Amino acid sequence: MTRDTPFSQRRARLLETIGEGIAVIPTAPEVARNRDSDFPYRFDSYFHYLTGFGEPQAVLVLVGGERPRQILFCRDKDEEREIWDGYRLGFEAAREALGMDETFSIDELDAQMPSLIADQPRLLYPAGADRGWDARVFGWLNEVRGMARTGIRAPATLTDVRSLLDDMRLLKDAHELATMRKAADISADAHIRAMRLTAPGRMEYEIEAELLHEFRRRGSQFPAYTSIVAGGANACVLHYRENNAVLRDGDLLLIDAGCELDGYASDITRTFPVNGRFSGPQRDIYDLVLAAQHAAIAAVAPGRSWDEPHQAAVDVLVRGFIDLGLCEGTPEAVIESGDYRRFYMHRTGHWLGLDVHDVGDYREAGQWRPLREGMTLTVEPGCYIRPAAGVPEAFWNIGVRIEDDVVVTPGGCEILTAGVPKSIEAIEALMRSGTD
Ligand code: GLY
Ligand code: MN
Ligand code: MN
């Protein structure tokens, strides 16, 4: 009897979509860092979406049709290994704990899979995601094909199960949104901590440490991606990761950082003055990016297209670039020529979920996808000005990005990361209050 959990509900929905066929979804492999040390283990997002199970060496098998079966292969209990590496649920306890119909030791996988696949019309698995799994799955298929003379048939159709799961993962359920809200709150507080503790003379990595401190203290397992802590000109390197420069009086600091909580990412960027006061040119650029972000957020609502927030941001930025002498011509001409891309070269957001750049197509049948209630995305316009001839010198090396996470609601959107100040007044007030 399967227990009713968000995970069992997702499995049931996937089984309905599959109809006749069998789906095989392995979790991620453990990855060696060097000799006996592994990278911290992170489960596969699809596998986790359907099981909530965090141990390595596990495979979910869903058999569709009139008598659906939910089967998990996972590690067996092992007293010796548990002394060294820690607790394992074990396949016997996994049946009840994870609401599966049947569970087996992972050591049984190769023995069981050919008979499970036999006579199924369709096999669904993440084809091409991992060479090792591809070889193993084709091995099972060939074994079944070898039984042809006994009247057994191998699946005629191979489907990438990710295409079905991507559509499901794009619309977050209540359980996912609750976790994403918590992740967003932790990251928001981490940014506030970083703002309070920033001062001239501190190193970028000291501020990174403050972010990690707040993430971990609040139960987040990992950063959702490598934190960007970029002072001054480093903010103009979009994927800056060194985080090893000194923070200088008069510079801005751009922080793009978010925690992962129970598998779900948050993704926040704030930009603020190292000394707590924006200069005139910094204000000009900051207020422009903030206006672009407000316009983009206002364009997030059910039925609006994926591209509308981006267009709204570009429209505001381009007019500002012209006013500030960064671009020349009419807004239409600057948008048409793409000249604004010298200062704004990325898009205004991405889907957010189990992966920071989450799954889900951005277009459907060649058209930008309409936004729907329950989709979660980032809204993150920016402006990055490198020294160049013809660019007003007052703006050189200013890099600003403002990024929030939003969920589409019936009336528009809810900003999950609204806890971190972003108006100039609010940022300056927070920094004045320092650590008291
Ligand atoms: N931090 C990755 C991104 O903003 O897309
Ligand atoms: Mn982002
Ligand atoms: Mn980001």
Image: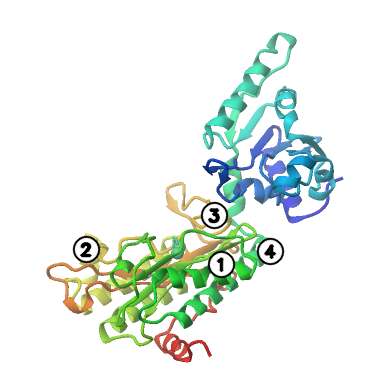
Q: Which residue is mark 2?
A: 339
Q: Amino acid at mark 2?
A: Asp
User: Of the residues under marks 2 and 4, which one precedes in the sequence?
Assistant: 4
The residue lying at 62 percent from left, 18 percent from top is: 142
Quadrant of the rendered image containing residue 309: bottom left
133 sits left or right of 15 in the view: left
Which quadrant is the N terminus positioned in? top right
Above or below: residue 36 compared with residue 267 = above
Q: Does the Cβ of the disc 1 residue fall within 8 Å of ligand 2? A: no
Mark nearest the camera among 3 and 2 is 3
User: Mark 1–mark 4 contact, CB under 8 Å?
Assistant: no
Task: Report the disc number at residue 355.
Answer: 3
Nearer to us in this view, 54 or 123: 54
Q: Which residue is mark 1?
A: 408
Above or below: residue 324 compared with residue 163 = below
Task: Assign a secondary structure to mark 3.
Answer: loop
User: Mark 2–mark 1 contact, CB under 8 Å?
Assistant: no
Image coordinates for residue 293, horizontal then vertical, percent: 41, 74
Quadrant of the rendered image containing residue 277: bottom left
Q: Which residue is mark 4?
A: 174
Distance from label 3 to label 2 (Cα)?
32 Å
Distance from label 2 to label 4 (Cα)?
42 Å
Task: Assign a secondary structure to mark 2.
Answer: helix
Distance from label 4 to label 3 (Cα)?
17 Å
The residue lying at 53 percent from left, 37 percent from top is: 129
Above or below: residue 99 compared with residue 333 = above
User: Of the residues under marks 4 and 3, which one precedes in the sequence?
Assistant: 4
